[in-house]
């Protein structure tokens, strides 16, 4: 981790590391050293250094604190009722003059919030000129190679001796009814006992020899077309180049010699995962509402809902119940999914490192391939049909996440890089003002991408119906949109800033992999950049009809307060609870 410094903001990272030793030791460089301190701390392997520290700081420490958190069902509703009663009593005690004063103050505040800054005020803000912006788009070139019959995607970059390894297994070999097990399997890999390691020992081996091991899933859209959706389960790890062999040994142990038959361990992991997902549903309403909305109009949205959305949470609850009555049935399903996925014919490998380290990786990868089982890589037919539902997701949250959107490509419109600037205008000007400043939400923004998806999003929003009305008002805002050269320059610079964020070698490798699998080209990337730099106010105004077409489809989903959603029940085709 210290050698890698895996942050694109290296200047900030190194400055933070320097501050402490600089202030307390007078040495600004002590915080950047790691070889010498690590050599010193490793002496603890043969001395009682760590034992003394543990005794002093933990075992012999007499200071402690115990906090008990006791839930009270219905507490939020009780607090809300008390607040409403208190406000009503306050209002009844006020004179007409006092009420009018509050009304006038509020009206004045709204007028102030809606007022645009004067050109003189804006001119005082330092700003780049368009001529200061790099004209050429960044491009990270991945190269396709072969290891036997297996496709290897290599991104060549300086990584300071670190190899970033990713193995991708095509999920299309599974039948539709088993898709829910894909993400569940990623949460089990590396945490189960194997033929040669108890899970705690395996975890130690991973920590000692690698910079991390993880599993997950990713979805790619070749040609930026939803119908071409290609989902993968991936496992990834990173190591110093001299540990590549050990990395593949441990990966083999995890993929091919895992013990799914240990029902006690599996039960622990399954219940823990179910709890974690339940907490995530409560804490990340935006993510779940977004997946739900996308499932109304896209094939990839349906897949993501089945494998990571509310549908997955409900599936997981059913699996927990099934495991309680018939653990062998769950073990059998997981074993079948793993056996179908983890075969040589279903593997695509990706690696980020320089050419010298690639030779080391390649030799060990070939050895890994030789030991892999063979099997079928025949793709199954899935019936992933989007269905418009326009749901309200009932929770005890005090705020809403209000989302509306559709795929503009399905309405006959084409992608252009100028839509990146539209995204900047709507997010930082229109919705920022209407949803956040005036509406009181934590944020309001759009998400527009080359796949065709256009979403309008509010974040931690006290409103619901009013926000949907604001989205509709976007059309008139765009029809009347005007901006002088300075304002358009500001929008374009903001857009370029989001396109040109700094990236680490591992991030560049993942970007190169995505572009390779989706068939993106350097020419397309350059065309997008050229379009951004040439965007005019007339271009933005001319996009009003496309936005109108998207909003007229009337696809939306709201995650939020149950009372607020119930009060607006007529807006929804159905109301659902995250807890099935």
Image (spheres, rainbow, N blue to C red):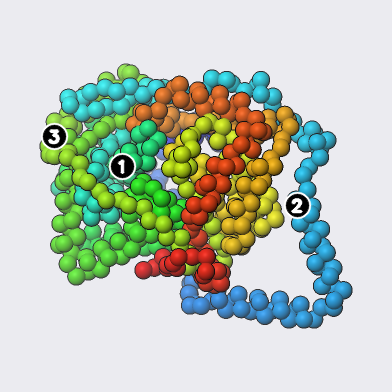
Identify which residue is drawn at 67% across, 33% down: 537
Q: Closer to the N terminus: mark 3 or mark 1?
A: 1
Mark 2 nearby-residue class (10 Å; few <14, some 14–19, many ≥20): some
274 in relation to 8, above or below: below
Q: Pinpoint residue 570: horizontal percent, then vertical percent.
A: 52, 69
140 in relation to 297, above or below: above
Q: Nearer the viewer, residue 323 or 57?
A: 323
Asked if disc 2 and disc 3 are in contact, CB closer than 8 Å, the reply is no
Q: Secondary structure at mark 1?
A: strand
Q: Closer to the N terminus: mark 1 or mark 2?
A: 2
- As drawn, the label of residue 371 is 3
Q: On the rendered structure, is 189 left or right of 505?
A: left
Identify which residue is drawn at 68% across, 30% down: 489
Of tags 3 and 1, the one toward the viewer is 1
The residue that label 2 is drawn on is: 113
**Residue 160 appears in the figure:** no
The residue that label 1 is drawn on is: 231
Q: Secondary structure at mark 2?
A: helix
Q: Place residue 86 in its image quadrant.
A: bottom right
Identify which residue is drawn at 64% across, 38% down: 541
Q: Secondary structure at mark 3?
A: loop
Q: Closer to the N terminus: mark 2 or mark 3?
A: 2
């Amino acid at each position: 981790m210290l050698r890698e410094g895996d942050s694109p903001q290296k200047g900030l990272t190194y400055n933070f590391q320097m501050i402490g030793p600089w202030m307390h030791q007078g040495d600004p460089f002590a915080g950047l050293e790691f070889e010498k301190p690590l050599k010193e701390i490793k002496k603890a392997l043969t001395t009682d250094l760590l034992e003394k520290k543990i005794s002093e700081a933990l075992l012999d420490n007499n200071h402690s604190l115990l906090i008990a958190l006791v839930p009270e069902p219905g507490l939020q509703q009780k607090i809300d009722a008390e607040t409403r009663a208190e406000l009503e009593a306050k209002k009844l005690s006020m004179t007409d003059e006092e009420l009018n004063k509050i009304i006038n103050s509020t009206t004045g505040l709204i007028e102030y919030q809606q007022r645009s800054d004067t050109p003189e005020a804006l001119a005082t803000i330092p700003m780049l000129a368009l001529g200061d912006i790099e004209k050429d788009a960044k491009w990270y070139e991945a190269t396709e190679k072969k290891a036997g019959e297996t496709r290897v995607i290599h991104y060549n970059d300086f990584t300071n001796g670190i190899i970033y390894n990713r193995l991708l297994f095509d999920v299309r070999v599974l039948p539709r009814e088993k898709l829910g097990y894909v993400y569940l399997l990623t949460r089990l890999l590396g945490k189960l006992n194997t033929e040669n390691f108890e899970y705690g020992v395996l975890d130690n081996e991973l920590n000692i020899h690698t910079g991390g091991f993880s599993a997950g899933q990713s979805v790619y859209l070749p040609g930026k077309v939803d119908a071409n959706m290609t989902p993968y389960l991936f496992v990834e790890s990173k190591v110093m180049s001299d540990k590549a062999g050990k990395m593949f040994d441990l990966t083999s142990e995890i993929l091919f010699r895992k013990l799914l038959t240990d029902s006690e361990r599996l039960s622990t992991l399954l219940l823990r995962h179910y709890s974690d997902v339940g907490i995530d549903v409560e804490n990340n309403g935006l993510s779940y509402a977004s997946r739900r909305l996308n499932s109304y109009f896209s094939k990839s949205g349906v897949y993501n809902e089945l494998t990571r959305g509310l549908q997955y949470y409900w599936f997981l609850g059913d699996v927990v119940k099934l495991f309680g009555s018939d653990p062998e049935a769950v073990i059998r399903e997981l074993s079948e999914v793993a056996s179908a996925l983890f075969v040589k014919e279903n593997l695509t490998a990706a690696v980020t490192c320089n050419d010298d380290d690639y030779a080391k990786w390649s030799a060990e990868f070939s050895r890994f391939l030789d030991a892999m089982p063979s099997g079928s890589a025949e793709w199954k037919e899935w019936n992933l049909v989007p269905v418009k539902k326009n749901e309200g997701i009932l929770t005890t949250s005090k705020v809403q996440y209000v989302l509306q959107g559709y795929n503009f490509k399905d309405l006959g419109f084409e992608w252009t890089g100028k839509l990146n600037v539209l995204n900047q205008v709507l997010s930082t000007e229109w919705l920022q003002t209407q949803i956040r400043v005036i509406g009181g939400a934590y944020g309001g923004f759009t998400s527009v991408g080359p796949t065709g998806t256009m979403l309008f999003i509010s974040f931690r929003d006290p409103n619901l119906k009013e926000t949907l009305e604001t989205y509709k008002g976007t059309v008139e805002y765009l029809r009347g949109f005007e901006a002088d050269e300075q304002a358009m320059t500001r929008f374009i610079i903001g857009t370029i800033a989001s396109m040109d964020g700094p990236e680490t070698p591992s991030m560049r490798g993942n970007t190169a992999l995505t572009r390779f699998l989706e068939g993106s080209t350097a020419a397309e990337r350059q065309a997008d950049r050229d379009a951004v730099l040439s965007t005019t106010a007339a271009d933005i105004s001319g996009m009003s009809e496309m936005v109108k077409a998207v909003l007229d489809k009337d696809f939306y989903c709201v995650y939020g307060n149950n009372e607020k959603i119930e009060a607006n029940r007529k807006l929804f085709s159905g109301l659902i609870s995250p807890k099935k």
